[in-house]
């Protein structure tokens, strides 16, 4: 198996080292792992692409490239430049430092990379490590991802079918905020939503020259959400797997809207 790996934390992020270990196990002795990752941190860039500017590609090692762009740019660079002669069978993104459960997935460059993989007809899987008091200070905060990453990806590959329709699925995997020996299992999960006080907000700061700046600040990440959602299952020490797709149509509202419009034109 040929695998392309990327992330949004940058080419030097420790989670990318963990992802490479996972990818090498999946690829096997006859496989191939290529790294194409941002040269600097791109957290929060979602599915952004560098549409109005070119970006530089630098080979920094064997099958390892840094891209002066976003995670989605990295996927495109991998597919259409670096690996164009022999494209990858699988694209993995992560392992992100911090969770991409709930609405965090909508901001995530980690998830944005595999959305682009899906749009390009490739199987894409994002992997993120939830952090909390039980794992943030241990020797390897990515221990749960290290231990369960291969199993989670293999579970997805057994059921994945990228030829379903025009918007094939991509997958969002979140590892719980606990050491590996406390992981309760792997579960399929719907995307959750945190309470409003758990969403991003701005926080004012002033420079030494008394100029006003705003930082973005996230809310608490340790409050459960809807039952069987990724957020709640992660906080119960489960690995969550959430199938997603780029079709943003709200089918429930679509039915209501069609009914209302049909009634108006009878």
Image: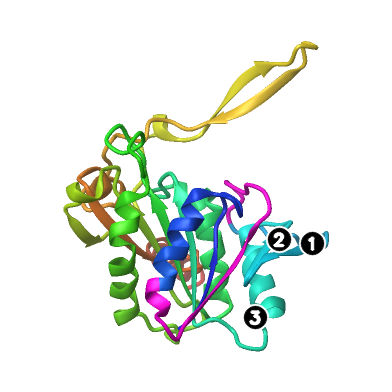
Instruction: Report whether residue 129 is seen.
Output: yes
4 or 252: nearer the viewer: 4
Q: Earlier in the sequence, mark 2 or mark 3?
A: 2
Locate residue 37: give its quadrant: bottom right
Q: Which residue is the site of mark 2?
A: 67
In the rendered view, would you say 217 is above or below 188? above
Q: Earlier in the sequence, mark 2 or mark 1?
A: 1
Q: Position of residue 221 (x, y in %)?
A: 36, 35
Locate residue 219: give its quadrant: top left
Q: Which residues are magenta?
A: 25-46
Asked which secondary structure carries label 3, the reply is: loop
Q: Which residue is the site of mark 3?
A: 83
Locate residue 57: give its quadrant: bottom right
Q: Position of residue 167 (x, y in %)?
A: 50, 76
Q: Badge 1: how crowded within 10 Å, few (<14), some, or many (20+)? A: few
The span from disc 2 to disc 3 (Cα, nearest Å) is: 14 Å
């Amino acid at each position: 198996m040929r695998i392309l790996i990327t992330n949004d934390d940058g080419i030097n992020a420790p989670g990318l080292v963990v992802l490479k270990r996972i990818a090498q196990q999946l690829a096997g002795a006859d496989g191939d792992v290529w790294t194409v990752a941002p040269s600097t941190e791109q957290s929060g860039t979602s599915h952004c692409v560098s549409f109005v500017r070119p970006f530089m590609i630098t080979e920094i090692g064997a099958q390892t490239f840094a891209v002066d762009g976003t995670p989605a740019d990295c996927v495109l660079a991998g597919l259409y430049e670096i690996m164009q002669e022999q494209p990858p069978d699988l694209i993995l993104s992560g392992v992100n430092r911090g969770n991409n459960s709930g609405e965090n997935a909508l901001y995530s460059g980690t998830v944005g990379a595999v959305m682009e993989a899906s749009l390009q007809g490739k199987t894409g899987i994002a992997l993120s490590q939830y952090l909390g008091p039980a794992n943030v200070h241990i020797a390897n905060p990515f221990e749960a991802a290290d231990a369960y990453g291969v199993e989670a990806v293999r579970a997805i590959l057994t059921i994945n079918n990228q030829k379903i329709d025009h918007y094939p699925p991509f997958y969002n995997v979140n590892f719980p905020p606990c050491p590996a020996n406390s992981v309760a299992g792997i579960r399929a999960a719907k995307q959750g939503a945190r309470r409003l006080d758990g969403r991003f907000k701005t926080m004012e700061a002033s420079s030494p020259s008394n100029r006003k700046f705003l930082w973005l600040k996230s809310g608490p990440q340790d409050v459960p959400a809807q039952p069987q959602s990724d957020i709640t299952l992660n906080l119960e020490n489960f690995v969550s797997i959430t199938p997603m797709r780029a079709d943003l149509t709200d089918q429930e509202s679509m039915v209501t809207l069609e009914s209302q419009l049909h009634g108006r034109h009878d």
